[in-house]
Amino acid sequence: MDDRGGGSFVAVRRVSPQGVDRSNTCQTTSAEAVAGSTAWLSCVCAQGTEDDSRPSFDLTPEQEDCLMRLQNRLDIAYDSSVPEHQESLLALWKAAFPEEELHGLISEQWKEMGWQGKDPSTDFRGGGFISLENLLYFARNFPKSFQDLLRKQEGDRSMWEYPFAVAGVNITFMLIQMLDLEAVKPRTLVGATFLKFLSDNESAFNLLYCIAFALMDHLWLAMHASYMDFNAVMKLTRHQLEKELLEENITRLEELPSCSHLLGNS
């Protein structure tokens, strides 16, 4: 597994009342990187520490296969020299800004999406290639919600907002920790419950990611949060997802109460 604990993941987006100013992509954009620490990852996901004494849950052969396939995806680090990875990154740009030509895989334009610098590959260390897959799935399957969150079009926004793309990497990382996906067998009831959804829907992780992103933004607005509150919002997002996943009457991820934040904007 690639090192998900390194790198700087603190960045914020300054939002004007008109939204993202994209009139000149070669100048400083409305997505401004702010120097910081690894807090955006380490604090968000520090709730679950490794403890080998935790019980494990038995899986059906089908659930074992689904978990193994997902774990194989988790093991893929983003590699800018791999054509498939380049194509996925370009596809993400086209989905986000269909009317704007990208001038290169390394470009100041990427800051408009909420990456910390001109080369998004440096931010993928926290989530690997699957974090790009998650963003692309979100853009393709829930385009209105994706665009609303990308452009911060809903609600009374803070002057200093969370950076969309880097927040997305954090959400991938948070879900991996919350669901205990790196373990051979799930050691939490939440993780075991998720595998039931995964065995019924191969895209369950992608879908839960989209729900988590929409929920995070909903809580962000409800808390009138600014970038210093990001870790608190992420912890509350995790807590709410864990609570909903364990509700007895939930048989599909689409039935999670928080899914309404996603579907309501799609």
Image: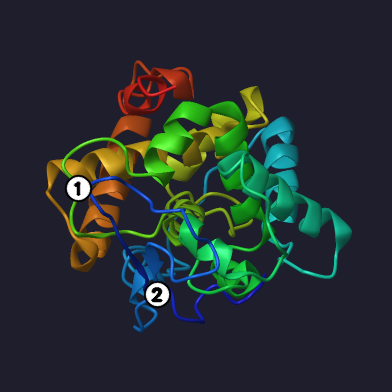
Quarter-of-image position of residue 39: bottom left
Q: Nearer the viewer, residue 150 or 250?
A: 150
Residue occupying the point 39% across, 27% down = 262
User: Outermost residue, right direction?
Assistant: 83
Specify the label residue 136 is tagged with.
Answer: none
Q: Position of residue 247 (x, y in %)?
A: 31, 25
Callout 1: 10 Å neighbours few (<14), some, many (20+)?
some
Q: Quadrant of the N terminus?
A: bottom right
Q: Position of residue 118 (x, y in %)?
A: 58, 73
Q: Earlier in the sequence, mark 1 or mark 2?
A: 2
Tell whether 9 sits left or right of 119. Answer: left
Q: Is residue 163 above or below residue 154?
A: below
Residue occupying the point 19% across, 43% down = 221
Specify whether residue 111 is in view.
Answer: yes
Identify which amino acid the numbered label 2 is placed on. Answer: Ala
Tell whether 28 sits left or right of 98. Answer: left
Q: Position of residue 52 (x, y in %)?
A: 48, 68
Specify whether residue 58 is in view.
Answer: no
Find numbered disc 1 in the image and state the secondary structure of the residue it sits on.
Answer: loop
Tell whether 70 sits left or right of 162. Answer: right
Q: Position of residue 95 (x, y in %)?
A: 62, 39
Residue occupying the point 49% across, 65% down = 111
Identify which amino acid the numbered label 1 is placed on. Answer: Arg
Specify the label residue 157 is tagged with.
Answer: 1
Q: Nearer the viewer, residue 211 or 135?
A: 135
Find numbered disc 2 in the image and state the secondary structure of the residue it sits on.
Answer: loop
Q: What colouring does the structure picture have?
A: rainbow
Quarter-of-image position of residue 86: bottom right
Q: Nearer the viewer, residue 66 or 83?
A: 83
Q: Which residue is mark 2?
A: 33
